[in-house]
Amino acid sequence: MSVNQQAHTGPPYGQPQPGYQGYQQPAYGGQPLPGAAPSQYGAYNGPMPGYQQPVPPQGTSQAPPTSGAPPPASGASLPSGHLAYSQFGHGDVQNGIPASAASMQRPPASQPFLPGSAPTPVSPTPTFQQYGPPPASVQQLSNHMAGMTIGSTTASAPPPAGLGYGPPTSVPPVSGSFSATGSGLYTPYTASQGPPPTTVSQAQVPGFAPPPSSTGLGPSSYPPTTGAPRAPTMPGPPLPGQTVAGPPTSQPNHVSSPPPLSAMPGPHPGPPMSGLHGPPPPTHPPQPGYQMQQNGSFGQVRGPQPNYGGAYPGTPNYGSQPGPPPPPKRLDPDSIPSPIQVIEDDRNNRGSEPFVTGVRGQVPPLVTTNFLVKDQGNASPRYIRCTSYNIPCTSDMAKQSQVPLAAVIKPLATLPPEEPLPYLVDHGESGPVRCNRCKAYMCPFMQFIEGGRRFQCCFCSCVTEVPAHYFQHLDHTGKRVDFYDRPELSMGSYEFLATVDYCKNNKFPSPPAFIFMIDVSYNAVKSGLVRLICEELKSLLDYLPREGTMEESAIRVGFVTYNKVLHFYNVKSSLAQPQMMVVSDVADMFVPLLDGFLVNVNESRTVITSLLDQIPEMFADTRETETVFAPVIQAGLEALKAAECAGKLFIFHTSLPVAEAPGKLKNRDDKKLVNTDKEKTLFQPQTSFYNNLAKDCVAQGCCVDLFLFPNQYLDVATLGVVTYQTGGSIYKYAYFQLETDQDRFLNDLRRDVQKEVGFDAVMRVRTSTGIRATDFFGAFYMSNTTDVEMAGLDCDKTITVEFKHDDKLSEDSGALLQCALLYTSCAGQRRLRIHNLSLNCCTQLADLYRNCETDTLINYLAKYAYRGVLSSPVKTVRDALISQCAQILACYRKNCASPSSAGQLILPECMKLLPVYLNCVLKSDVLQPGPEVTTDDRAYIRQLVTSMDVAETNVFFYPRLLPLTKADVDSDSLPAAIRNSEERLSKGDIYLLENGLNIFVWVGVNVQQGLIQNLFGVSSFGQISKALSTLPVLDNPFSKKVRAIVDMLQMQRSRYMKLIVVKQEDKLEMLFKHFLVEDKSLNGGASYVDFLCHMHKEIRQLLS
Ligand SMILES: [Zn+2]
């Protein structure tokens, strides 16, 4: 027994580490967390000694550029993957960065749901187009459920006297939808109650809310609460276990909300209620030419549908009301916000123009829209996306809205070929220019003063001398004359070459190493895995990451095999044959050889090839079934330590490590814990051993990528700890079979080995005064409260950062973020990548709700919830999510929407998909597992989602469903996606569903024989093999088109998706239906319609 081995008495997983924390947040004082190792980079971001000390120039440092001229374009000294900044031309840059005043606008904050039967003079769709002024109208969704009798609202309704709204005609409606939703009411309201509108877009904000401090809306109050003072702000975020109740009903608040309808028999007195009264016809067949919900239809009522039979769990009856019981009714799914329509609209409206980042607070196009980015001073949305681009000026406002303020950052994101990589800036031996106090890096928002001799920091306001070599004159506008020559003055993203001050131990790093560590126990050998890996490595080693056009990769490689013991290989180029060294004392791991373990591939190619040929033979007859695991990581770590370099371990592992060794695990899987208070233990590691190991790995820059091939439980929650905390990736291939899974595995391996990765990375996010980063989600380690450390950070990894107010913000200055990532490139060059983003700030809640991004919000909420399951019962986590979203929507309803009946669900335009997407998160395997989902699956998904970017969470939670039989075989385009519901599927068609991990091909029972022949090469439905993991290669247009679609989707995703063919009415269809997320799920997940009604009820409760 090793001294390192600890009994299973450790604290729950990562209590001290933010990455694994539950709802309780760490203190934000910048103090090291208890038990955390001191950061090696303490000085990097702070005023502490270390990096700031002047150090004689070393290594590749270049002479500083001469003042007034761009530095020499010494292309040779720059990695060619990066553009030397002298190449940075003036061409693309136009006007620098306007301080504020977004000229481009997000689509309207809200949009009307027109009554289906009402005339629609102008389709609302055009209001999405142009980024001009949003329409003023409000999206209203009338809930006909449970006998609610709310009808449409029309412009013909005169505002009731005495409400203080002023004449309804003072401002002409901007669109047909405007007049159709009673919006005539609101404009005068704005004029009489709010500040005078200064811009068109402001004038159109429905129901301007007064600042939270304002007392009393006076005459604008709705009849029941006339003259009531403003309600106190909404309660803070719910804590686990805390149920969130609406404000006490005794408080006279909610000035714009009428009492719930159910309490008010008879005609509703409210002004918007001039439409239909009384229940609509019990069944209202969809009308021809009936527009999708974006066109504002109220919920149409259909008869009960089999898919929607069940109520939301726990809420069997929604709002039953006295009086004649209405016939059972359901919202028409066509009348509720459709993800497909929103995606489509954004594509049409924003896909054709490049997204130019020169304007503060611009909301980018959706992640599902293809668009080009032109960097003119703010980081591309490929690097940073925010939950809102207009953040409340005060923390009270932020709390009231409950909208989380978060940024999803992908510092090394891959860009499309049309967009240039960040320019690399070399400031020579003195390093990047930084603020003296907060150490922020030079960026477009720094203000040069005193003729250019000093600059004032945009983050902390401190004034810093401009170093002599960096001095430049200012033009008449106060802008440096070299503004366009310097990426750090005119662009949102760029890199600095780091000086030795930024290196560990003040030494430039060596190139990193890759160590391949192969499980050679019985299962691995028998399945053919060992042979497969060895064969693949022979060619894959030629594709190690290279910098730019370097001839060969600088990365060295090493090899280890293991079962209960470890085998190291000497593959020194001078050897005729590789040599094996066995270490059987796994309790105290050491590396038995230094020279010859890590080698250059080209130099040692013969020996390596020989080794890879021999390994499968050497273990072909093994009977060893037991494995160790922690000693494998320790061996890799020790090897990197000995070589004094960072690197990545690629571990191929098959089973629960039960052999006697440090980090030995026991099978503790217990599905009976699901839905109990102990469920959280399934997500926690069973020993703290791996947390400590992870800490050591991070200190060395040892990133661990894990390829798992389990035939049974192997405790992903524990085995994944080191991977997770070192910034690595986990891949899992359950019941690995060569013929069906090898393509997927090999594609994943190839991509994983080749992808861009930075080592020994530290990320810090600085913010301007008033907000600060308080919480972080992702695969990393934190030893203090500000620095995110990653042994490795690849191009697919995302870190989600939450911000909180620590002071007031101002509308004038807005808010700034600067993300600085210090890392070692694959060639061993130390660099800083800087991303800057400027956001607007608002004093009106409506501005917040108009500039949100729901996809990013969902990314944050999912990560928040998935971390919550480590410390709270799953039900508590789910309830907290629902409660928070209900509060977000209720706050909008109360403060921003025009007055209307409580029976109407009114959603902000930017958040109209929040309910459907939230429901998908709630129904996901982590939060609501079906019986077929294993404990390891859940732990695996939990870890995957935590590093996903916004595009990945979007398709993961709401999969893409494409009707293949509708594809145009003559074009490159994809068929239009459809909504994820069984009732959208036709028996005569073939569909493809993808979620980033799987691709399903669903075949209806009535599909024409010719199509089946063309796609599967068999003559009938019955002959289609369910075991297909690829589509047969057939020479006909349909087959080619479908395979091209599949290939294209595979290219878009960071993992190779598993292809599964599903035949309608076959057993496997259950699995497929799990992904039809708008339907009620077998394990109790609500349908979209039911969930929307449930949310509506929650919102009404908060408002009543
Ligand atoms: Zn500063």
Image (spheres, rainbow, N blue to C red):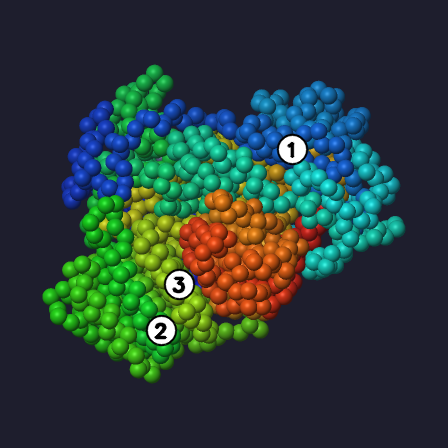
- The residue sitting at 50% across, 68% down in the picture is 1027
Pinpoint residue 71: horizontal percent, then vertical percent: 21, 31
Q: Amino acid at mark 3?
A: Asp
Say which quadrant the N terminus sits in: bottom left
Residue identified by numbered label 3:
743
Pinpoint residue 668: horizontal percent, then vertical percent: 48, 75
Residue identified by numbered label 1:
124
- Element carrying mark 1: loop
Q: Nearer the viewer, residue 18 or 1036?
A: 1036
Q: Amino acid at mark 2?
A: Gly
Dot 3 or dot 2, earlier in sequence: 2
Q: Quadrant of ligand 1?
A: top left
Mark 2 neighbour density, 10 Å: few (under 14) some (14–19) many (20 or more): some
- The residue sitting at 39% across, 63% down in the picture is 743
In the image, is residue 288 above or below residue 736?
A: above
- Element carrying mark 3: helix
CB under 8 Å between callouts 3 and 2?
Answer: no
Kindly indicate the quadrant of the structure image that contains residue 128: top right
Of labels 2 and 1, the one closer to you: 2
Q: Amino acid at mark 1?
A: Pro
- Element carrying mark 2: loop
The number of numbered discs placed on residues in the rendered structure image is 3
- The residue sitting at 33% across, 53% down in the picture is 755
Pinpoint residue 481: horizontal percent, then vertical percent: 29, 22
Q: CA distance from mark 3 to mark 2?
A: 13 Å
Residue 937 in view, yes or no: yes
- The residue sitting at 32% across, 75% down in the picture is 520
- Residue 1056 is left or right of residue 24, and the answer is left
Kindly indicate the quadrant of the structure image that contains residue 428: top left
Say which quadrant the C terminus sits in: top right
